[in-house]
Amino acid sequence: SLALGSWPFAAFERAVEVTVEAQDGAGNGVSAARSVGTVTRLRWVVELAPGAAPIPVPGAVAVDGQGTAILGASDARLYFIGSDGAARRPAVAVGAGALAAPVVVGATGVWVPSDDGKVYRVPSDAAAGVEMVCDTGAAVRGVALDSVGEPLASVSLGVFYSGRCRNSPIYAGDVLYQPVARGLIYFGSEGNTIHALSQNAQGIPVEDSAASASLSAPIAAPLAIRSSGDLIALTNLGTTGSLLSISPTGTPTPLATTDVPSDGPVVLSSGDLVVPEKGKTLSAWSATGAFRWRSAALPGLPLTPLVLAGGADQLLVADARGNLTALDAAGQLRWTTQLAPAAIPLRPPNLVALPGGAHSLGYFPAANGRLYAVILDGRLDGAAPWPKAFHDPRNTGNAATAQPAP
């Protein structure tokens, strides 16, 4: 028998033929070919709520330490799907609003931001009840965890709340994205401003004005953090975007002019930065802003890619038209497929390493209420400072969170 996974496979799906050749001592040769059928990377597809109307639209997916995909949806329910496609526990009703923001796996449960204006915690113990942690009064955009696991929630009406339901000052602009964290310090974007916040002894988010930054244009995508501790931000200049680094002392440095960003950047192990763009491309830049490459146009607006190591596919890109595309380290197309039906957006993906370490199982939620599982070559690049949306499989948004062991 042949382990097909040990052979290069630069495709999502393809008919495979095995050819056997033999030669005797006199140099006489013979060969025989045989089709082994179609090989596909698609492992399974799960419908979250079969027959439900309207169809629940999932948000970003998180992955716990057992490889379970955990995702909220527009039906105010939290779903738990194992790597075999089976439900690990019954769906849990959480609040009264859509669960559009990314859920975050903590030490003892899942932090769930809700459009009903509340932050919930769903305990790991399935017998325990859902805990409403904080009523913020407006849609919650996301939660980040600091290095001791304390949450900070970003709220649409320009305010941030701690896990003890204490709030920061109320700022003038809207908050659109999940905060990020570097150790015990959180960074939340609001309008043109990045606020550096830490929690005092009473759990009140207090701003460190020396580490905060005011930019010249609106922040247009989630933040990332590189190994130096600098924040990486993307702003919208109207017809172009700007890629900037912000030092730990709050000093912004423009690095490059990009296309208008379509989602947040990733930081590679080399220090290079990759930006998803509304021109349906990815662009890559050195740590100092030198141009590396720009991909050919993708089928749809790209989301933040997954960064892989251990195979020829370095970047896995889900897009807003249901496509999944693999690129190599030079930004060249390896393969692409229409994963969800045409024009059905994919949501931010995640992955779990499969036994043996050579492959991973990618989880790709789609707006048709389904979760797609796809076999990927390699695993999440643990040497990359920011290899995916929300940093790590648990979606903590914290640069100090350890990635899964290789």
Image (cartoon, rainbow, N blue to C red):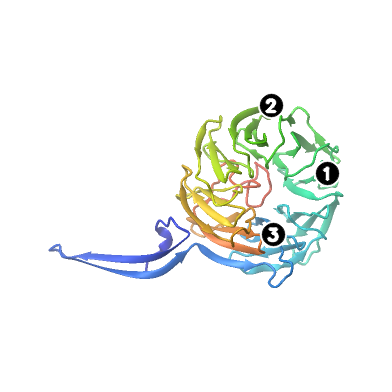
**First reached walking from the N terminus: tag 1 or tag 2:** 1
Q: CA distance from mark 2 to mark 3?
A: 37 Å
Residue appearing at x 81%, y 48% in the figure: 163
Q: Pointer 3: what residue?
A: 58
* Label 3 neighbour load within 10 Å: few <14, some 14-19, many 20+: many
Looking at the rendered structure, the secondary structure element under dot 2 is: loop
Give, as a three-letter code, the residue at label 1: Leu
Left or right: residue 18 versus residue 94 is left
Name the residue rendered at 72%, 70% in the picture: 52
Which residue, given by chain and number where applicable, does mark 2 sit on?
A: 251
Q: Position of residue 11 (x, y in %)?
A: 45, 57
* Amino acid, disc 2: Thr
Query: Residue drawn at (73%, 30%), measured in percent from left and top?
Result: 213
Residue 240 in the image: state x and y as whole percent: 62, 35
Q: Earlier in the sequence, mark 2 or mark 3?
A: 3
Comparing marks 2 and 3, which lies closer to the viewer? 3
Q: Position of residue 284 (x, y in %)?
A: 53, 38
Which image quarter holds the N terminus? bottom left
Q: Which residue is mark 1?
A: 157
State the residue lying farthest toward the left: 26
Please state if 206 lies on the left or on the right of 110 as rendered: right
Q: Secondary structure at mark 1?
A: loop
Left or right: where does residue 396 sit relative to residue 9? right
**Exactly how many numbered labels are in the figure?**
3
Instruction: Kindly report the distance in space between the C-alpha atoms of the residues bearing marks 1 and 2.
Output: 26 Å
> Does 311 appear above or below 126?
above
Label 1 or label 3, whichever comes before in sequence order? 3
Give the answer, above or below, for where 374 lies relative to 199.
below
